[in-house]
Amino acid sequence: MRHLLNPLDFSVEEITRLLDLAGDIEHNLPKYAHVCDGKKLATLFYEPSTRTRLSFEAAMLNLGGSVLGFASADSSSAAKGESVADTIRIISCYADICAMRHPKEGAPLVASQFSSIPVINAGDGGHQHPTQTLTDLLTIRNLKGRLDNLTVGLCGDLKFGRTVHSLIEALVRYTGIRFVLISPQELKVPGYIRTDVLDKNHVEYKEVDNLDEAMPELDILYMTRVQKERFFNEEDYIRLKDSYILDRQKMKLAKEDMYVLHPLPRVNEISVEVDKDPRAAYFRQAQYGVYARMALIMTLLEVEKPC
């Protein structure tokens, strides 16, 4: 039995196989309609989510399985004080696999230690979001045809953005990856990411605070919102929330084959006028998330690929 708690839980070779499976699912969806008949996915979401929770549910339903779970801590026994360990012990009696989102870093890891079913980390605080990373890798590979030799700009909240942290950890394993880290001083990528991930793997990167100057050199621009829920001080959030807004004028500075990604939800960091640009890929990215999660569920449940 395996879990997915961190993007590095799968080797590069395993990621390639999973992305290949997701690609086959995309182009042959009907043949996967019954591969998980009789299987149940539990979605344990201790904090709000739209895309991640519903894409997991859509993924399992597309595979012929069923779904149970809760969408907030208030609607679970956590509101009565039940521990994560006890919750997962109970859920293991009801489901075959579970996806957990939790505001505390490491909660899915704790769950995995007491679980008798595979646990998928669907986001833990500001730490990791590995299934979003699978989605991002699938999106980049589909759009650019490769996962190596790319200049990737990460813009916005790089301090609390768990999608950013997970994507950096995943991409440093590919050759020729270069990062441009675009953020205000207060929201720079955490020191451990610079030291333990970027520097340790001898990955080229630079930290800047000007999006306009970075645009012309990027192959991928990964926008993020400034996350109000991660701030202790509302004044700091208000001061920083509009640091970067991608609009039509900024898009004119970019390459013709540069694509914009965003884990969503967006607030105002991407103007709606950008949605019409063919390089705006964030809604396609959300669709790819369903295929990536279908492939992951099949992989963790060791379901055979249909002929």
Image (spheres, helix red, strand yellow):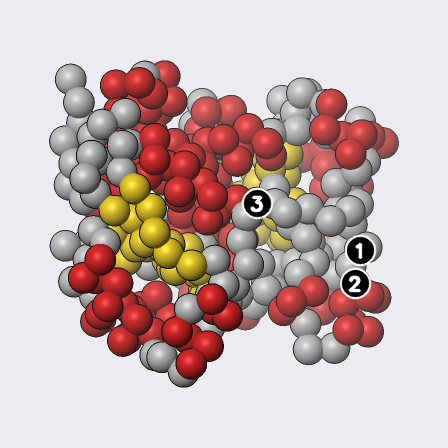
Q: Marks 1 and 3, Cα distance to the nearest angstrom? A: 18 Å
Residue type at mark 2 is: Leu
Quadrant where the C terminus is found in the figure: top left
Q: Position of residue 62 (x, y in %)?
A: 34, 30
State if disc 1 and disc 2 touch (CB < 8 Å): yes
Specify whether residue 137 is in view.
no
- The residue where tag 3 is placed is 263
Specify whether residue 297 is in view.
yes
- Disc 3 element: loop
- The residue where tag 1 is placed is 243
Quadrant where the N terminus is found in the figure: bottom left
- Against 161, residue 144 (above or below) is above
Residue visible at 72% across and 28% down in the picture: 275
Q: Marks 3 and 2, Cα distance to the nearest angstrom? A: 19 Å
Residue type at mark 1 is: Ser
Residue type at mark 3 is: Pro
Residue visible at 46% across and 31% down in the picture: 288
Label 1 or label 3, whichever comes before in sequence order: 1
Residue visible at 74% across and 77% down in the picture: 233
Label 3 or label 2, whichever comes before in sequence order: 2
Relative to residue 215, is residue 2 drawn left or right? left
- Disc 2 element: helix
Tag nearer the camera, 3 or 2: 3
- Disc 1 element: loop
